[in-house]
Amino acid sequence: MDLPDPLTKAQALHVRAGSRTPVQRMIPEETPVAMVYDGTTHAVMMATPADIREFALGFSLTEGIVEHPGQIASCDVIAHDRGVEARIWLAEDRAEALAARRRTLAGPVGCGLCGIDSLDQAVRPLPDLSGAGPALDAAQIAAATDSLRDWQPLHDQSRAVHAAGFLMPGRGVVLAREDVGRHNALDKLIGAMALTGVDAGQGAFVLTSRVSVEMVQKCALAGGAVLIAVSAPTAHALRLAQGAGVTLAAFARGEGFDLFTHPYRLTDEVSDVA
């Protein structure tokens, strides 16, 4: 099986200043890539499905698994329906060192999808949120990321952190959290909402980042049926949002945005996007 193309075409509805125009966007693919050392999965990373051997080598070097390329005996890239495996076989001394390192770990290592260690775990089942969630008008969606700026004191001081906010129809952003990691900011927000009794189904999540698989998963599992972001979605994230019934609006800046999925939550319904 061949690796998927790193880019794919997606249809969206560009909404700006009262006009709605169907557009086609090129968006990146996002694929689970399992780093498998000597037959054991070490971590699963979400990545663009290109240059996987180089990715495997770089990961191996930066994680301290090897000190130089010569300590990798071989690396095979295997594509599956559910993702990609980088099957890495280590020189004997590095294999022993990695085995000893694993024995000292309390849990799985690496970043990616919260340290998961199986391709089967990379895309979890999500609730079907079709029909749930709020109705939002175009002006609210377009202004969402600008509204979030008032909730970013750490960003104002550092220019180095992401934010995740929650927008309520007619009220704007009512709660937000910041972190150097976009996933962490969203987790903090979802935790704050749970503690204060804010129902994710009554508003929209607003992100200062691109929309990756993890961000859609977190929003949907929290019960959020609308996701608004300042940047683009990946193709995989778009498919997840479509399947979970999540309305996904991206490139929300100033007066416009692109609406990729489930447009019926926009107050005057349109049918240009499936």
Image (cartoon, rainbow, N blue to C red):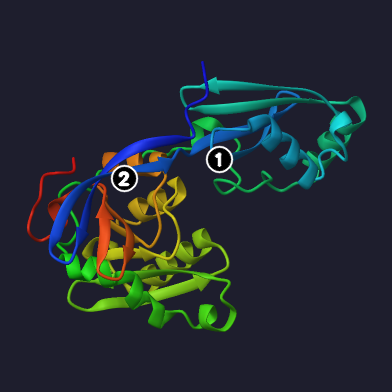
Can you tell which mark lies on residue 241?
A: 2
Q: Could you classify mark 2 by the number of other residues whose Cα lies within 10 Å: few (under 14), some (14-19), or many (20 or more)? A: many
| Circle 1 SS class | strand
Can you tell which mark lies on residue 21?
A: none
> In the rendering, at what x and y percent does residue 41 appear?
66, 31
Name the residue nearer the viewer: 156 or 217: 156
The relative height of residue 185 versus residue 96 in the rendered view (above or below) is below
Q: Is residue 90 left or right of residue 174?
A: right
Name the residue nearer the viewer: 154 or 48: 48
Question: What's the residue type where badge 1 is placed?
Answer: Ala
Q: Is residue 133 left or right of residue 158?
A: left
| Circle 2 SS class | helix
The relative height of residue 50 versus residue 23 in the rendered view (above or below) is above
Count of numbered badges drawn on the protein = 2
Q: Is residue 153 left or right of residue 18?
A: right
At a point 45% along the width and 38% down the height, the residue shown is 29
Query: Which quarter of the picture shows residue 172?
Result: bottom left
Furthest residue in direction left, as rendered: 268
Report if residue 154 is visible in the image: yes
Q: Which residue is mark 1?
A: 47
Question: What's the residue type where badge 2 is placed?
Answer: Ala
> In the rendering, at what x and y percent does residue 146 appear?
34, 75
Single out the mark in the foreground, 1 or 2.
1
> In the rendering, at what x and y percent does residue 251 appear?
34, 59
